Image (spheres, coloured by chain):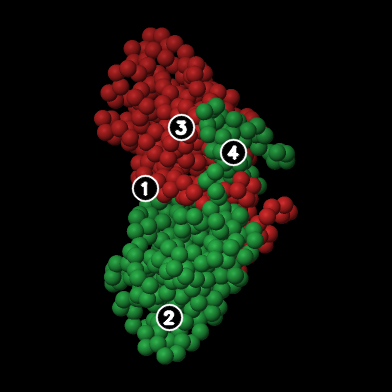
Chain colours: A green, B red
Amino acid sequence: MTANHPYDPTFTDRVINSMGPKTNPRLRQLMASLIRHIHDFARENELTVDEWMAGVQMINWAGKMSDEKRNEGQLLCDVIGLESLVDEITYKVVSESDAPTATAILGPFFRADTIARKNGDSIVTGVDDGEMTFMHGQVVDFTTKQPIAGATVEVWQASTNGLYEQQDPNQVEHNLRGKFTTDENGRYWFYCIRPTPYPVPGDGPAGKLLEMMDRHPFRPAHIHILATHDKYKPLVTQIFDRKDQYLTNDSVFAVKDSLIVDFVPRKDDPKASLELNYDVKLVPAEPSS
Amino acid sequence: MTANHPYDPTFTDRVINSMGPKTNPRLRQLMASLIRHIHDFARENELTVDEWMAGVQMINWAGKMSDEKRNEGQLLCDVIGLESLVDEITYKVVSESDAPTATAILGPFFRADTIARKNGDSIVTGVDDGEMTFMHGQVVDFTTKQPIAGATVEVWQASTNGLYEQQDPNQVEHNLRGKFTTDENGRYWFYCIRPTPYPVPGDGPAGKLLEMMDRHPFRPAHIHILATHDKYKPLVTQIFDRKDQYLTNDSVFAVKDSLIVDFVPRKDDPKASLELNYDVKLVPAEPSS
């Protein structure tokens, strides 16, 4: 609050205090804090009109590129670590103890209308150069360690060309994604490919910002998982291949040590040369009192 | 830099330090500061994924609405005072002494291709309910007090319906705007209307944000001025009618005391019932060494 700068020391408070009495209290808190931080940012760096306008144009560009299939505003946040940070904050209850599965960002390629598949199915169509993998695991209650039957395990991954199916007109719809339901022992199993690293799109403001910051655009190879059940908190996570070269410098900062997994050789399965075992621990939802 | 919160204390530095060696030094400074402020904002307020996503959607919405004629990203910044603050910062050399004309924001309705008009012309076409005003003044050198001949004085104002010509299909192109050149005595003169207050557009994210913050959208009545001359620093300003009801609570925070002017009765001029005298003091440009 100290004003050790040559600018009008009352300005920021005047802007904040212009909010009227009917403002939602949480919104008032967030806007007051955001206005203070953005004004401090401008003053501390003596931000010029031209620099500010370059930022405005980047934001407008992000909005223009965004549609049902692509969220460039989200991607801009991702490359400065904001989605990962907000994920950490939101799920801190889950991640305070490191025993439940750690969380990671949802990312812009999730589809709410992912199709259901049966355990044992393959999510892979038309990927000739992928390493086929048998992925399986158990969903359990973090507190009781008991298996959770009827849990939904939703997975999605990019193809070997670095594109998710909704980005790629050459992939069949819903390729490399599917929604599985755990059996009476809490188990799920299916075939996928070993994921490969890919760059975030380079044709928009997020790609431009990465280039300006002299950063590479690659995400380490990963599989997205969303695990849900009525009686448990939903879990959004990503699991990463231990052998990936971008594990320590993910362009969107989503890697956590506990999310690194090993793909091991699988024998006697004509459908897959690799195997991945991944168990999910869910935290019970708050009692609805 | 202290980490009195439960979140990974290395995270923000890791994001900042991912910038590569080829990053422009000024960009590195700005991005490091922006990332630190935005991460602090998220942590201090325990920003949730849903709240963050609401912000992303607002930014994407702003981009979608923006085009050649409308800059909604800019307007979002304006309603949180950012353009006024950046204006104050950028022109602090000019405004450090309060003797040169104070500056104000350019705003989203400036046109780079404004047409030239002759002194004595009217910028008004088809405004039946406006109070016609004879505006005139002298452009002088702030240091020598000598008149500046050949200076450009560009003005633009909204019509009585609250719309600038580019927002309003019923106005002729370039209505209520014009570019004048000072005569050998540094003088300019023309006819305009007494400006009236108007709301910033309510159909986009900036209007929505104002509504959520329980704030009115009105700007006090004003005339925009851009004064330029090769040998002087360009001056961007707005002048405000002393009798306006929104003078103390401009929705974009652009009013300064020194920019408030008086419209006085004008006699014996069939073309105008009001008169406005406004002199502009320009600061010499830095010598080009």
Which part of the image, by quadrant, shows the C terminus of chain A?
top right
Q: Is residue A262 above or below residue A71?
A: below
Query: Label 2 vs label 1: CA separation?
Result: 41 Å
Q: Whole-percent x and y of residue B111?
A: 38, 40
Q: Whole-percent x and y of residue A48?
A: 56, 47
Corner quadrant of residue B135:
top left
Determine if residue A261 is in view: yes
The reply to whether callout 3 and callout 2 are in contact (CB within 8 Å) is no
Q: Which residue is mark 2?
A: A133
Query: Label 3 vs label 2: CA separation?
Result: 52 Å
Corner quadrant of residue A84:
bottom right
Dot label at residue B211: 3
| Mark in the foreground, 2 or 4 | 2
Q: Chain of mark 3?
A: B
| Mark in the foreground, 4 or 3 | 4
Name the residue located 28 percent from the left edge and 30 percent from the top edge.
B171
What type is the residue that disc 1 sits on?
Lys
Q: Whole-percent x and y of residue B73?
A: 44, 44
Helix, strand or loop at disc 3? helix
Question: For the residue carrying disc 1, how many other residues have a C-alpha within 10 Å: few (<14), some (14-19), or many (20+)?
Answer: many
